[in-house]
Every structure is written in C-alpha cells, then in structure tokens.
Image (spheres, rainbow, N blue to C red):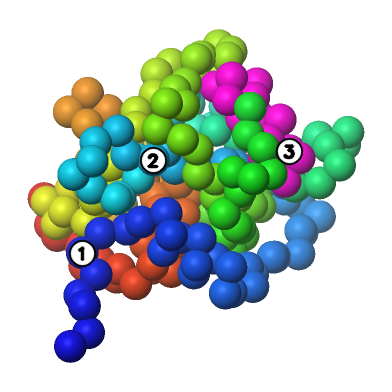
Amino acid sequence: MKKIQTEITVDTVRQVLSQRTPLMIKSAPQHRDAAVAVILRDSLTSSTLSPELLLIQRAQYPQDPWSGNLSFPGGKIDPDDRSVYAAAIRETREEVNLCLRREHCLGRLDDIYAVSVKVRVSAYVFNVPAHFDYVQGNCEVERHFWVPMTHFLCGDSHAMRTIAWHEDRAEVPSFLIHPEAPPLWGLTYRFVRQLLRHCGFNLSLARD
C-alpha cells in the first residue's frame, strides 16, 4: 500500500526540485528584476522531519511597495551581481545577516511576475541547520518568524481574507502564520503555494 504523505521534508524538497527544470521567465523591458531566498531550517524538535520556513515582516518604508508585509529575504538584482543566485545571497546577508553557501541550496522555483508591481522575481530554496537563527541586518526588516511547514497544511490557516494594499482593499488568498503577523499573501504566498504544489500538496481555500 502506498504511504500517504502527511508532511513536507527537506529530502522531499531536494528531490522534487532536482527532478524538474524551473520556468525562467524572460524579463520584460518595463519590469524590474528581483531575487529572494526561500530558507528552510531543520526542525528544532525530534517529533517532526518537517522544516521551518523563514518569513520576515518588512519595516514601514515609503519606497518599499511591500512595506509592512510578510516576505522572503530578497530584493532587486543590482548590475554588480554576477547572477540571480548571487543577488539572492547578497540580499539575504544584507537583510537578515545569514551567510548562505552553495551547499545550502536545494534548487530553484519557477519565476513569478508580480501582479501589482512590475517586477520579475526569481526564488532559490535553501536548507540550513537547526542552530541557524536570524540577526537583523538592516532597517528594512521589522521582525521575523520561523514557521513550521506543517502549519501551511492546516486548513484553518488558508483562506480568502480582505487586506489593505496602500489606498485600496482587496480580498485575496492568504495564510495566517502568527497572531501578531499580517496575513501572508501576494507574491510570497504564490511562492509558498508553488513549493507545496511541487511537493504534492494542493490545498483548497476556506472562507473566513
């Protein structure tokens, strides 16, 4: 009998990403390019093999379109960056003071175009040991959360919610990750859903 998968493991992520070719979208002239790091940390407990995912809450910053929202460490690709991968490494070091290395990299997700802001975003997935923690690197980050990946498989956390986007309000699919955190939605939500889908989890949306 086939074993039913009930949690996401680092080995699963490594295997599925190594067996697929990521979709790399060609950059459009009107779009900026950015790179983010999807960082998984080995579980601090022995009761689960499922890792924790690092999410940061961006500080209130007028020039940041995602000000105050949850995101991955990352940012725009600079002309001096040797590659998209190098940009993700640099931005992670600057924002959260984590020094990622090649051996931490599990693979790359499909590129995504942001809907509301004209930017193409590429995401690399990393796995770090359980003792890795975050030390705030710059003023762009207000706080951080390590979220067990099993949390995203709980139906109650995944629903349509009304969020404020600058001067507008919209109903969007989202995850709740912490009582004191805003909902996880938008571009970062889409990357999390993509990772879950690659690992064999297609979640349905509940209504609040």
Q: Quadrant of residue 147?
A: top left
Q: Earlier in the sequence, mark 1 or mark 2?
A: 1
Of mark 1 and mark 3, the one earlier in the sequence is 1
Mark 3 Cα shell of 10 Å, populated few (<14), some (14-19), many (≥20): many
Can you tell which of label 1 and label 3 is closer to the viewer? 1
Residue 87 is tagged as: 3
Q: Label 1 is placed on what type of residue?
A: Thr
Q: Please give the residue where the numbered disc 1 appears in the rendered image.
A: 6
SS for callout 2: loop
User: What separation in Å lies between label 1 and label 2 (alpha carbons)?
Assistant: 17 Å
At 29% from the left and 70% from the top, the residue drawn is 202
Residue in the image at 58% along x and 63% along y: 110
**Mark 2 and mark 3: span between their CA atoms?**
24 Å
Give the residue at x 64% y 45%.
Answer: 103
Q: From the viewer's perspective, is 31 left or right of 56?
A: right
Q: Give the answer, above or below, for where 136 lies relative to 7.
A: above
Q: Which residue is mark 2?
A: 42
Q: Secondary structure at mark 3?
A: helix
**Relative to the observer, which residue lies in front, 102 or 180?**
102
Counting residues from the start of the chain, the first of labels 2 and 3 encountered is: 2
Q: Magenta segment, principal secondary structure?
A: helix
Residue 24 rendering spot, x and y as whole percentages: 69, 65
Comparing labels 2 and 3, the label whose residue is closer to the camera: 2
Distance from Cα at disc 1 to Cα at disc 3: 34 Å
Give the extent of the magenta segment: 85-98
